[in-house]
Structure formats: structure tokens, C-alpha cells
Amino acid sequence: MKVALFGHCGKVGSVLGPALESSGHEVTGIGSDDAVEVGGMDAAIDFTRPDAVEENVRACLDQGVPVIVGTSGANLDKLDSTAREKGLAVLLVPNFAVGAVLMMRFAEEAARHLPAVEIVELHHETKLDAPSGTAKATADRVGDDVPIHSVRLPGLVAHQEVLLGGPGQPRAAQRAPAGSDRRAGGGAVTNKEIVRRYGEEVWVRGDFSKVEELLTQDYVGHSGLKDRSREELLTDVDFYRAHHPNMHLDVLEQFEAGEKVVSRLRVYSAGKVAHGINISRVVDGRIAEEWAVWTEFE
């Protein structure tokens, strides 16, 4: 299939794009500054932001393309009639993880017998929406204006808990991973994916808000004549991006063994190309150490 992927450089998109390509699909990434030209595509997928998704979906419907939306917090009520008039499918999926989907189904059933229900959902501090799309979807299935408690703190892994109770009944609880920072198939994020995100989000996009999530406090980079700390690395990233503001990063090959990830990389900038080999050591979901060797731009 020919697939347009909105948010191809984001947390999910950077993982989903390669997964689709490895399955034989032709993927066209569309960024926030790109024109939405999807005519001739078989389908579009959106993992962007709640304030961008409606415009993206509208553009797809206008060009005759069905859409799958995984953007957390998306509200597409305004486009329901448009999609029906055009006979195009728009599938809004709050969570693709099997465990989260089962949790929502079980909570709906349990609430028939334990009517007092509250939801607690936890995510890292960079998550844009609160409550999460999964929490709101769970509350919709349970009904009766269920209270949702949202927690946003550094270092948290996406998680949701549904608490249920009733007169004379002990408390019941259902827990499951919840959120979009998951692998394309719904499983845990791999070390390779963490390294890919680091390259795309920190080096290419210069998004330093992701550093706490992707690098340990005592990170050490081994390249050149001198080791560098996390703070020194960010200074280097600033310098590098100032001289190569429109660079593009390709991951040509990646191999993972335990804590180590070996990446063969290629960077384009201003018509020139540089190649590099990067070895990353990932501990508890964050990069703790790196060794890198790069060619000059030619």
C-alpha cells in the first residue's frame, strides 16, 4: 500500500514508518511544514498533535483518502458528517496496545457490578494532552462521568489504572501500559528505537526537551580526543545544527545486542554527505554512553 504518514519524525512515527516499510508498504512522511498532498495514496496515518490532526484529516478527506488517527487527545466530531458524505473511513484509535484495549473492555464489564469507578493515568512530563486519549476512551466506555486523575512527571512510563468499588465490596483494580510511546506492534520500546529517537529528535530537530527522557544524567560521549558530558554534548549539538540547519539523518543499519546498539548512519546537509558509525549503551531506557566515528562532509 501507499501510505501517507503524518508525524513521521515523532515518537510513534519514527518507529511506525520503518515498520511499515519493512512490511512492504511505500511510506511518504509528511511534516508540520509540508504541503498535504496525499492524492493517489491508499491510506493516511496521523500521529501528530491534537491541534493539528483535524486539519490533516480534513485535507485527506478532501483528496479522497481514508485515515487512521492515533493522535492522543484528537477530537474529530466535526468531521463525522464529512467522512460519511464522502464514503471514506476515519478510524480514531486511542491506543493500539492489546493490553490497553483489553483493560478498557474489562473495565466496562466490571463497572456493571462495581459502579464506583475512578481512573489514574501516568505519563512523562512532555505528553501534550491531559487526560490522555486512552483515559478518556476508558471513561466513555464505563460511563457516568468517571473522574480521571492525570499525573505528568519526568521519568514516568505510560501507565493507566482503573479503580473500582461498590457497597460491601473490596477494591478491584486493573492496570496496563497505556500511551503512544510504544513500539509499532504495541510492545515495549526497544533500545534501537531509543537511539533512533535520540538522533532524530535531539540532533536533527534540536528538541532539548527530550534529553531528560533519552539520556542519563551521567551520560558520557566518547568521540575525538576528549570525553564529553551531557551538557557538553548539547553545546556540540547547538554548534552542529547552526552550521547544518537543514540536515537529514538516515539510519542505514542497526544491530542490537543487550545494552549495546550499533548504528550505521548517513547525514545529508547542503548537498553534502557524511557517514558515521555509532555505538550506544542503553540503560533502563536511556542512553548512558556513546562511541562515534564520522567522516567529513563531502
Image (spheres, helix red, strand yellow):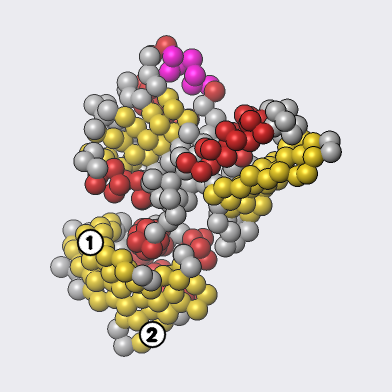
* Residue 81 lies in the magenta stretch: yes
- Circle 1: residue type: Glu
Residue at (50, 78) in percent of width and height: 218
Q: Between residue 100 and residue 67, name the one nearer to us.
A: 100
Residue at (53, 38) in percent of width and height: 102
Residue sitting at the far left: 298
User: Along the horizontal axis of the image, is 221 left or right of 293?
Assistant: right
Residue 179 percent across, percent down from the top left: 52, 46
Q: Quadrant of residue 270?
A: bottom left
* Residue 298 lies in the magenta stretch: no
Q: Quadrant of residue 289?
A: bottom left
Residue sitting at the far bottom: 225
182 vs 296: above or below? above
Identify the secondary structure beneath mark 2.
strand
Q: Between residue 209 and residue 212, name the one nearer to us.
A: 212
Q: Main secondary structure of the magenta part?
A: helix
Residue at (50, 39) in percent of width and height: 95
278 vs 6: above or below? below
**Disc 2: which residue:** 227
Residue 46 percent across, percent down from the top left: 41, 37
Q: Quadrant of residue 266?
A: bottom left
Dot 1 surroundings within 10 Å: few (below 14), some, or many (20 or more)?
A: few
Inspect this view and state whether residue 246 appears: yes
Residue 137 percent across, percent down from the top left: 59, 33
Disc on res. 183: none
- Circle 2: residue type: Asp
What span is in magenta?
78-84
Between circles 1 and 2, the one closer to the viewer is 1
**Cα–Cα gap, marks 1 and 2:** 25 Å
**Disc 1: which residue:** 253
23 vs 294: above or below? above
User: Along the horizontal axis of the image, is 235 left or right of 224?
Assistant: right
